[in-house]
Amino acid sequence: MKILKNNQIIIYVIALMLVAAGYLNYTSQNNKLVETSSDAGIIDTNEIADIGDAKLVSSNDIVEDTNTISEDTEETSSNVSNEYFTKSKLERETMYSQMIESYQNILNNTNSSETQKTTATQEISKINEIKNGIMICENLISTKGFENNVIFVNGDSVSVIIEADNLSQEEIAQIQNIISRELNADINNIHITNK
């Protein structure tokens, strides 16, 4: 019986370590962005987007060139933003795949007890439910006009990053309602950030 409890503890520790590694990876990337910004003397994340933006000059001769530069800058900025959201989603999916693989190894191990296999099956089911809920939420948020968005679930806490200059209270409420409904999250545990 003692061996059974030790094995269950090991399973929970592995799961906790994988979740912690994913969360630390996520927060360290956000900290790098903030540290880089503050090192350059930039405090507000909205100011970061203004770097390199072309300004319209009052001379009529330069308007065409400025518009071309502005379009190129917007396209580059859009590509960088798209890359952030795509990379974040890929890293999140990789983390979930590694967790599922760890549980699959327990299921496939002939030395695993029935209790361990039951626990592993339950954890795989939870991960798949979270992944499905995240996918639904991200798609629903996209229909609200926020095509670039990414969601991270860490226990009861849900972090949502939206590509937007500003979010109105109504938009925040819509996003919170989607997350609350689809992920069964408490409104107080939903953290929305615009990028």
Image (cartoon, rainbow, N blue to C red):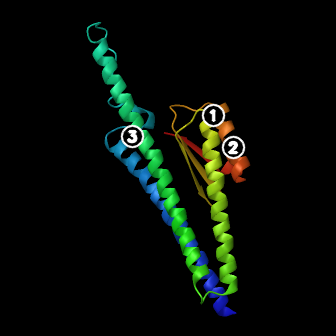
From the viewer's perspective, is 175 left or right of 18? right
C-beta proximity under 8 Å, tags 2 and 1? yes
Compare marks 2 and 3 and give the one earlier in the sequence.
3
Compare marks 2 and 1 and give the one earlier in the sequence.
1
User: Label 1: which residue?
Assistant: 144
SS assignment at label 2: helix
The percent coordinates of residue 35 (x first, y second) are 37, 48
Does the rendering let one see residue 126? yes
User: Label 2: which residue?
Assistant: 178
Judge the density around disc 2: few (<14), some (14-19), many (≥20) Cα neighbours within 10 Å. Answer: some
SS assignment at label 3: helix
Q: Amino acid at mark 1?
A: Lys
Q: Amino acid at mark 3?
A: Val
Residue 80 is labelled as 3
The percent coordinates of residue 79 (x first, y second) are 39, 38
Q: CA distance from mark 2 to mark 1?
A: 10 Å
Does the rendering let one see residue 53? no
With respect to residue 26, does 15 lie above or below? below
Residue at the (73%, 47%) spot, across then down = 181
Q: Amino acid at mark 2?
A: Ile
Residue at the (64%, 62%) spot, across then down = 128
With respect to residue 109, does 73 lie above or below? above
Q: CA distance from mark 2 to mark 3?
A: 27 Å
SS assignment at label 1: loop
